[in-house]
Image (cartoon, helix red, strand yellow):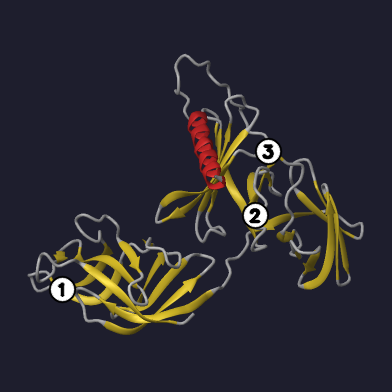
Amino acid sequence: MKSYIKNLSMALVAGLALVSCNENFDEDMPAINYPEKPSLGIWENDLAGENDVKYTVNLTLNEKGDTICDVTTFDPVSKRTNVFSNGKTTYDKRVGMIVVDYEDSPLDGPARVAINYTNDLQGRIINIYRNIVGSFTSAASFVPAEAKSVSVYGDWELADGTKVNFSSENGKATVNGAEGTYNYAGTEGTVTAGSKTYKFNLNDKGQMFFTENGGQAQYAKHVMTPLPDDWVEYAVGVYQSWLFDAQPDIIMEYSEYRSKGRITGLYVTNKTKTFLWKKGSSTVTLLDESYETGYGMNDGAGNQHQIIGYPNPLSNTDSRTAMYSNSGYGIFSFGMMYGDKNVGFIGPANQNDPMVDKYIIKEVFE
């Protein structure tokens, strides 16, 4: 029942977002006069359950006075904090929507946040997207409540280069690597580490300032959380191409945080095949657009061209380009088309044979 309620609430949020984005939804409805300029603010998903990820969104100004957006997430289960930092904002008054773009993010690539005014102009709708192979896919969606303060968890960098980290556990902090403690209540706090003590406060524009021993206040920016280096060797197997010779002893690595795998050392060029995959799931999403194989083909006029591999549907009846099955130790199947776009593509010896490469796992290291 809890899962059903969550799914229903997400559907309602998506519906509200569509209504707020459609200026011609109903010709009989009065026109909505959205603000000329969006107001700054701090919001959070206050309806999150005890074990749900907590989001804090801060539409604020940087030290130059440009409107930016920081998003802080906190997972109460893993205790991990992620910060989307210094997102560039644009505002479309016609539909009352702020779009925030991040060139890089803790989602392992570009991300986007859309903040919509509700039609009564009293609330907001927030959608967070990740970019997968050039397309934006929903990562979170919620109707937020206004918050009085930001989440301070994560890394901050002062104007003079000083780096401060606030942990989510037991008031622990570091200043330039020196361990210490902090307290934060409302919009003010103090951090002490080594020989340094700073007071810090959040102003009414959502900007954070630090002051050391009564000195001049310094603007501090919330710094993007780096991705964890959790790649490990997951398995060894044989890569069987439908066109080229099989390659034994090929290693697959896996990142638990990213839910991503990569198979390295493919073809003559030692290319890497990278894909989204959660252990045990049949769903695999290839993240590469093409692979230089190092093999050549003749165009019929005596000219050699490199054979390029391109993801391709697994079959005429299966539009997926990749999948996983748990046969044996596990098999990854990749639909692959080989050739040169300017010359042509190579077909199998038997036209009914599938153009599918397989990575057959021989041993899992975990």
Labels 1, 3: front one: 3
Tag 1–tag 2 contact (CB < 8 Å): no
Q: Residue lying farthest left?
A: 300
Spatial CA distance of label 1 from label 2 is 55 Å
Spatial CA distance of label 1 from label 3 is 61 Å
Q: Quadrant of residue 243?
A: bottom left
First in sequence, mark 1 or 3: give its number. 3
Tag 1–tag 3 contact (CB < 8 Å): no
The secondary element bearing badge 1 is classed as strand
Q: Which residue is mark 2?
A: 51
Relative vertical location of residue 332 with respect to residue 29 in this rendering, above or below: below
Q: Residues within 10 Å of mark 1 (few under 14, many from 20)?
A: some
Q: Residue lying farthest front?
A: 1
> Image point 28% across, 73% down: which residue?
358
Q: Residue lying farthest top?
A: 28
First in sequence, mark 1 or 2: give its number. 2
Kind of residue indicated by mark 1: Met
Q: Which image quarter holds the N terminus?
A: top right
Q: Which residue is mark 3?
A: 145
Labels 2, 3: front one: 2
Identify the mark at residue 297; answer none if there is no mark. Answer: 1
The answer to whether residue 278 is seen in the rendering is yes
The secondary element bearing badge 3 is classed as strand
Q: Nearer the viewer, residue 356 or 227?
A: 356
The answer to whether residue 100 is seen in the rendering is no
Spatial CA distance of label 2 from label 3 is 18 Å
Tag 2–tag 3 contact (CB < 8 Å): no
The x and y percentages for residue 229 are 56, 73
Relative vertical location of residue 157 with respect to residue 36 in this rendering, above or below: below
The x and y percentages for residue 287 are 39, 62
